[in-house]
Image (spheres, helix red, strand yellow):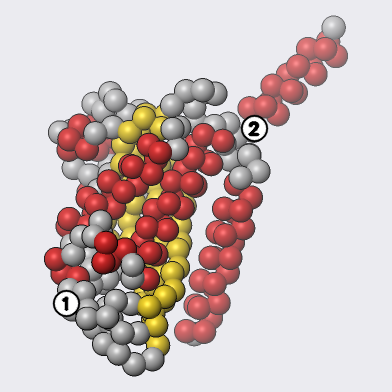
Amino acid sequence: MKKLVLTLLIAAVLLAGVSQPLAAKGDKIRIGVLRFTNDTRASWWNSQVGNELSDMLAAELVSTRSFSVLERRELDAVLNEQDLSASDRVSEQTKVKLKQLKGAQYLIAGTVSAYEEHVKGGGAGVRVGPVSLGGSKEKAYIAVDVKVVDTETGEIVDARTIEATAKGSALSGGLHIRNFSLNGEGYNKTPAGKAIRACILYIAEYLECSMIMGEDDECMEQWDEMDSRRKEKTRDAIQLDD
C-alpha cells in the first residue's frame, strides 16, 4: 500500500512539472489585444499604426477559432495600454486595473523592437522621413516582442520575440508613408508591408501553439529553434561590434 501511495505521489509531482495549455480542451481562451507600441525609428510608424497592428492580430487570432477576443473599447474603458506594452513589468496600479477586465483572462502586448530596410540597385529607393518606396529591389525585416499578461495576477506568463523578413520589388512612383494605412493595397505589395503581415501571422501561430497546444507540444520545437537562431545572430552581431 505504501509503495502504491509513493508511486501516485511521484506521478503527481511529475505531472505538475509538465507545462499545460492555458485552456481546457475545447474551451476558448478569452483575450484582449493591446495597441502595439514601437521602440524603433521606422519611418512608417504613427499612433494609428499601433491600432492597425492590434486589429490585424485580433483578426488572425479570431480566425484560429481558438480564442475569444475582447473588443477594443472594453480595454480602453479600463486601462491605459501603454502601462503594459512599454514596460517589462506590470505596476501595482495596473494590476488593480487588470482585475476590472472581467471579459479577458489574458492580454497580448506587442512592441516593434527592430525594423530594417535594405535597398539594392537603382531607382527611387527608400528615403528616411516621408518615405518613398519605389524602383528598387528591397528587403525588409521586423521583430516584435510579444508578452502574455495574466489579468488575474498581473504576471507576464509568456514572452517571445517574433521575426519576419520579406524580399521583393518596391512600388514604382513611390508611396508616401506618413499618412499610409497598413490595410491599403499598395503598401501590402511592398517588402515592408509583407514583412509586417507575415510577422502578425507568425505571432498568431505562436500564441495558438503556446497557449492552446501547450509548451510541451511538438509545435513548440520550431519556435524554440527559431528563437535559438535569433539569439545566436544577436550574439554574433554584438561580437562584430566589439
Q: Is residue 149 visible?
A: no
The residue at the far top in this view is 1
Q: Is residue 216 left or right of residue 202?
A: right
Establish if 27 lies above or below 117.
Answer: above
What residue would you read off at disc 1?
Answer: 130
x and y percent of residue 47 in the render?
17, 57
Q: Is residue 30 visible?
A: yes
Can you say which quadrant of the picture contains the N terminus?
top right
Establish if 71 lies above or below 241.
Answer: above
Q: Is residue 191 left or right of residue 37?
A: right
Query: What numbered label is drawn on residue 54?
Result: none
x and y percent of residue 204 in the render?
43, 46
The residue drawn where x is 42% and y is 58% is: 198
What residue would you read off at disc 2?
Answer: 17
The residue drawn where x is 22% and y is 79% is: 174
Question: In this view of the protein, which residue sits in the foreground, 168 or 237?
Answer: 168
Number of numbered labels in the structure image:
2
Q: CA distance from mark 2 to mark 1?
A: 52 Å
Q: Is residue 169 left or right of residue 221?
A: left
Mark toward the start of the polypeptide (2 vs 1): 2
Q: Residues within 10 Å of mark 1 (few under 14, many from 20)?
A: few
The residue drawn where x is 18% and y is 64% is: 180
x and y percent of residue 88 in the render?
35, 51
Establish if 24 lies above or below 164.
Answer: above
Establish if 2 lies above or below 126.
Answer: above
x and y percent of residue 132 in the render?
22, 79
| CB within 8 Å, label 2 to label 1 | no
Q: Residues within 10 Å of mark 2 (few under 14, many from 20)?
A: few
- Helix, strand or loop under label 2: loop
